[in-house]
């Protein structure tokens, strides 16, 4: 894991379930080279844990603030943590 690696824990709110948000998050994360996971939460939000360089994570956060075309993101809460290197790829949970 590179020294500049960061870990993001994000919750995305709005109309983000039933619009392929998880699929496009995984696709975007894989294209950027980020590892981690994305899942739906029972409160209607989407949760993301991702690791990569600061630049990669910032690119992912840019996507999360917009989402796929059918989504309507109202808010993204982010927490920045120390990367652990525990992920091999990016998965939908």
Image (cartoon, helix red, strand yellow):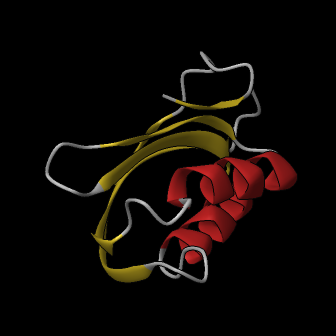
Q: Residue furthest left?
A: 43
Name the image quarter holding the N terminus.
top right
Asked whether 44 or 13 is in front, the reply is 44
Left or right: residue 44 versus residue 5 is left
- Image coordinates for residue 24, horizontal then vertical, percent: 66, 59
- Image coordinates for residue 57, horizontal then vertical, percent: 62, 57
Q: Residue furthest front?
A: 18
In the displayed structure, 16 sits above or below 34; it is below
Q: Quadrant of residue 81?
A: top left
- Image coordinates for residue 36, horizontal then vertical, percent: 59, 33
Asked whether 25 or 7 is in front, the reply is 25
Q: Residue at x 52, y 82 (%)?
A: 66
- Image coordinates for residue 59, horizontal then vertical, percent: 68, 69
Residue 38 visible in the displayed image: yes
Residue 5 visible in the displayed image: no
Q: Quadrant of residue 73?
A: bottom left
Q: Residue at x 61, y 73 (%)?
A: 63
Left or right: residue 33 versus residue 71 is right
Q: Residue at x 62, y 55 (%)?
A: 25
In the displayed structure, 91 sits above or below 63; it is above
Asked whether 49 or 66 is in front, the reply is 66
Q: Quadrant of residue 88?
A: top right
- Say how many tags the image has: 0
In the displayed structure, 29 sits above or below 35; it is below
Left or right: residue 22 versus residue 31 is left
Q: Residue at x 14, y 52 (%)?
A: 43
């Amino acid at each position: 894991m590179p020294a500049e690696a960061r870990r993001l824990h994000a919750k995305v709110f709005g109309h983000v379930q039933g619009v392929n948000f998880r699929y496009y998050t995984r696709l975007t994360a894989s294209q950027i080279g980020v590892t981690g996971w994305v899942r739906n939460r029972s409160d209607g939000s989407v949760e993301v844990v991702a690791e990569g360089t600061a630049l990669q994570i910032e690119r992912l956060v840019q996507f999360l603030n917009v989402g796929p075309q059918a989504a309507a993101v109202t808010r993204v809460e982010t927490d920045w943590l120390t990367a652990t290197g525990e992920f091999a790829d990016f998965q939908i949970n």
